Amino acid sequence: MKHFTCILFAILFSTFAFAKQIALSNEIKKTENTLEKPQEAATKNQTPEAFNHDAWNTLLQKNVTENGNVNYIAFKNNPTELQDYITALGNNMPTDTWTKKDKLAYWINAYNALTIDLIIKNYPVKSIKDIKNPWEQKLWKLGEKWYNLNEIEHEILRKMNEPRIHFAIVCASFSCPKLQNQAFTASNLEEQLTSATKAFLADSNRNEIASDSIKISKIFQWFSKDFKQNGSLIDFLNTYSEVQISSNAKKSYKTYNWNLND
């Protein structure tokens, strides 16, 4: 009887251990599936970029500070990588198959790269305005056409109805928004444009904002139409400002400093 009891106990113990092992195995598989699903979903939902801006991103990381100060001397002393990127832009023009975000990222990065190229072609200069007709010079062939900065800004970017481009494109001047030290990409564009807009409004060197009084960049005067697509200028500012501004706030504009952003 004692021997039978021991056998029965051994059988029950083995059964329990086996069941526990099965349960543990199922739990591990369940955890693995939980971890894999978001990764699989991300892979399925991720849209490849129409154009790879890594080369431009590398240049920005090397030659532009977090505060947007540009090392034009370094760009001028090592122009090959910038020229290679501009050549790549010219060989890969946006097409009708590109998304709006891909097109915006392309033209924002192109504008900023070509502005730096313009400066180093004329360096040393104290201001972009020391260059004769800086925004009218057709110096760059993209595809089959020669472009200047004015055309890219006014005929392409502004017509895409995205007012936040004004805080992404940079005219090489102190009062401009800071040049981001990372390339704009289609996959991160929404976050990047929002971040650039908020940072510009929060920068007291460019804007002074209080609830009842604002002294803002002349960008908002020069391109006022762009910021009134979905309401008033105050409505736009309140979307991105840390301070909520009264609709009756007094408004004035800061003097624009065209000194080089170096």
Image (cartoon, rainbow, N blue to C red):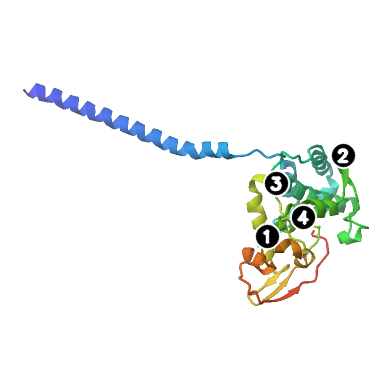
Residue at far left of view: 1
- Mark 2 and mark 3 lie on one chain; the one further toward the N terminus is 3
Q: Which residue is mark 2?
A: 144
- In which quadrant is the N terminus drawn? top left
Mark 1 vs mark 4, foreground winner is 4
Are the residues tagged 4 and 2 within 8 Å (C-beta)? Answer: no
Residue type, numbered disc 2: Glu
Mark 3 vs mark 1, foreground winner is 3
Residue type, numbered disc 3: Lys
Residue 114 percent across, percent down from the top left = 83, 49
Give the spatial CA distance, label 3 vs label 1. 19 Å
The 10 Å Cα crowd at callout 4, few under 14, some 14 to 19, many 20 or more, is: some
Mark 2 vs mark 1, foreground winner is 2
Visible residue check, residue 141 = yes
- Mark 4 and mark 2 lie on one chain; the one further toward the N terminus is 2
Per the rendering, the mark at residue 100 is 3
State the image quarter where residue 78 is shown.
top right
Per the rendering, the mark at residue 158 is 4
Q: Which residue is mark 1?
A: 197
Residue 200 percent across, percent down from the top left = 69, 63
